[in-house]
């Protein structure tokens, strides 16, 4: 069973197209869990237009994007879990090929696909997120420069269970989940684009740390992540 976990907040302009691109890849027993953090626009109405029993809309905690994603993930019952933003477009065979990678090598607990970065009108900005970020596996490589892009990630149930609950002070949920997967399994970066990643002024999550982050803040982020890894998995 597959669970796609989405966190929404005022995603009305794009969410119908995104949900449509997901549902056509899901089986009859799969689920799309949408944790909505109190949208004041037409987000929920757009979702309900589908009249699809695989969609489960739950009330978000209204504590920010990390807690909203955590809320969605806690409701997931699938063997494989995908994260989804509210404003992207999934390309054909994203689910199928991610699952194939994990089934062919049981040691792999998390797959990250490449994506194309586009603008609101889907015009290409960057042809490869991987090349933009030099994305590849490795715990310390990704602690130094995170390449775990949530909307491109699929991971196992065991990785989900080890990642939850999220520590209160982590800088981003996908960075945390990726590092957990590096500790407890193998990660695989699939060099094929299976998503159109919209970049605009209203993105809830970011593809990379903003340039405005100070050096001390960037160091602090990494220390917080490493400290929480040690506390959870190595503190005897």
Image (cartoon, rainbow, N blue to C red):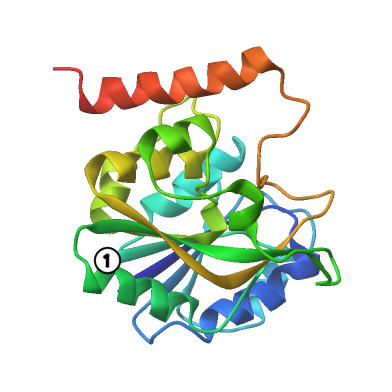
Residue in the foreground of this view, choosing between 43 and 186: 186
Residue 56 at x, y percent in the picture: 48, 68
Q: Residue at x 66, y 47 (%)?
A: 207
When asked about the image quadrant of residue 213, the answer is top right
Q: Position of residue 140 (x, y in %)?
A: 40, 32
Q: Is residue 147 left or right of residue 206?
A: left
- In the displayed structure, would residue 25 be above or below residue 228? below
Q: Is residue 34 visible?
A: no
Quadrant that contains the N terminus:
bottom left
The quadrant of the image that shows the C terminus is top left
Closest to the observer, 165 or 223: 223
**Residue that protrudes farthest toward the left in the picture:** 236
Secondary structure found at label 1: loop
Task: Please name the residue shown 46% across and 26% down the image.
Answer: 168
Residue assigned mark 1? 79
In the drawing, does residue 71 fall left or right of residue 38? left
> Which residue is at a point 50% across and 67% down the rendered structure image?
191
Compare residues 196 and 19 and report the one nearer the observer.
196
How many marks the image carries: the answer is: 1
Crowd band around label 1 with a 10 angstrom C-alpha radius: few (<14), some (14–19), many (20+): some
Percent from the top left, x then y, of residue 129?
63, 57
> Visible in this render: residue 117?
yes
Seen at 49% across and 28% down, the residue is 170
Quarter assignment of residue 91: bottom right
Find residue 17 and report its horizontal and vertical position in percent: 70, 77
In the image, 6 versus 151, the foreground residue is 151
State whether residue 172 is above or below residue 76.
Answer: above
């Amino acid at each position: 069973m597959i669970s796609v976990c989405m966190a929404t907040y005022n995603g009305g302009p794009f969410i119908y197209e995104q949900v449509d691109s997901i549902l056509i890849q899901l089986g009859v027993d799969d689920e799309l869990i949408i944790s909505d953090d109190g949208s004041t626009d037409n987000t929920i109405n757009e979702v309900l237009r589908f009249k699809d029993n695989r969609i489960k809309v739950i009330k978000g905690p209204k504590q920010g994007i990390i807690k909203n994603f955590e809320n969605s993930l806690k409701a997931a019952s699938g063997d494989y879990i995908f994260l989804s933003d509210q404003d992207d477009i999934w390309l054909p065979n994203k689910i199928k090929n991610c699952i194939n990678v994990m089934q062919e090598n049981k040691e792999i607990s998390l797959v990250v696909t490449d994506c194309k970065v586009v603008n609101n009108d889907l015009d290409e900005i960057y042809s490869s997120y991987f090349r933009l970020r030099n994305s590849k596996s490795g715990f310390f490589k990704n602690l130094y420069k995170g390449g775990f892009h949530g909307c491109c990630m699929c991971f196992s149930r065991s990785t989900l269970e080890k990642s939850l609950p999220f520590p209160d002070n982590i800088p981003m949920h996908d960075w945390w989940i990726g590092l957990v997967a590096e500790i407890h399994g193998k990660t695989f970066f699939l060099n094929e684009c299976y998503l159109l990643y919209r970049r605009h002024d209203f993105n809830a999550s970011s593809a990379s740390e903003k340039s405005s982050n100070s050096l001390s803040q960037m160091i602090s982020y990494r220390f917080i992540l490493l400290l929480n890894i040690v506390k959870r998995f190595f503190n005897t």
